[in-house]
Image (cartoon, helix red, strand yellow):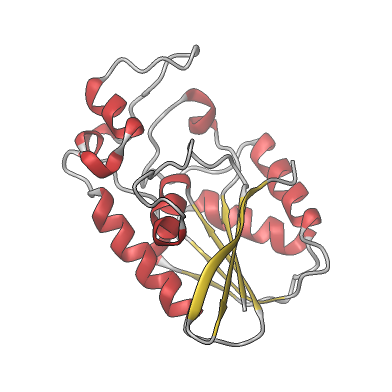
Amino acid sequence: MRIYVIRHGETLLNYKGVLQGWLDVSLNEKGKEEARKTGEGLKGIIFKKAFSSPLIRAKETTKIILEASGNLTTPLSEENRIKEINFGEYEGQVYKKPNGEIDNEDIKKFFKDPLQGDGATKGGETTYQVMERTQSFIKELASINDDNNYLVVTHGFATRAMLNFLYDDPSSFWQNGVPSNCVVNVIYAKDNKIYLEKKDVSFL
């Protein structure tokens, strides 16, 4: 089986450099176009089932991808375990300037190496809590062990947390950066073996 793990398209808060976490916002026009192009890039792949984070930006991305890829009849389920990390008291805060500079030391440490500290999630979740819930989902899905394709639409941090155990170097959480909007990772699973077949592919 193959599992296509995709980050949602852009939102206005992405564009403004805001820590979204569990804030529920829609895609902007660019995000909708990113989802459409990604769906077109996946044409020819038949998805048996799709799973989306319950947050609006992920659900919208999922529906656009299914339509653009020719999978309009694919069943879609919401999955709470693949929500984005909850940033606690930092949720909704602007974390970087237009030039990309980050002033807040907690947030700076978080984006440098969240495995070594969770300063940007005071009152929210830890990195390891998100890894536990997202990986429990993906391992459960992989255990179906059939020959079908599945679509999973989630978030940037949640993607890295979910796939961490499949990376060549799990100690490098960000793998050289936050995954871009609508980036695609492909997991191959068969006979209790699971590995990352394609990493950070973009159709944009």
Q: 178 or 64, which is in the foreground?
A: 178
Q: 199 or 101, which is in the foreground?
A: 199
Q: 193 or 60, which is in the foreground?
A: 193
Residue in the image at 45% along x and 61% along y = 166
Q: In the rendering, at what x and y percent does residue 173 appear?
A: 38, 45
The number of numbered discs placed on residues in the rendered structure image is 0
Residue 91 shown left or right of residue 61 in the figure: left
Residue in the image at 51% along x and 32% along y = 14
Q: In the rendering, at what x and y percent does residue 54 appear?
A: 45, 60
Q: In the rendering, at what x and y percent does residue 142 appear?
A: 50, 78
On screen, 147 above or below 92? below
Residue 171 shown left or right of residue 68 in the figure: left
**Looking at this rendering, what residue extends furthest in the top direction?**
99
Residue 172 shown left or right of residue 141 in the figure: left
On screen, 34 above or below 162? above
Residue in the image at 68% along x and 76% along y = 74
**Looking at this rendering, what residue extends furthest in the left direction?**
123
Q: In the rendering, at what x and y percent does residue 100 appear?
A: 47, 17
Quadrant where the C terminus sits is top right
Quadrant where the N terminus sits is bottom right
On screen, 157 above or below 48? above
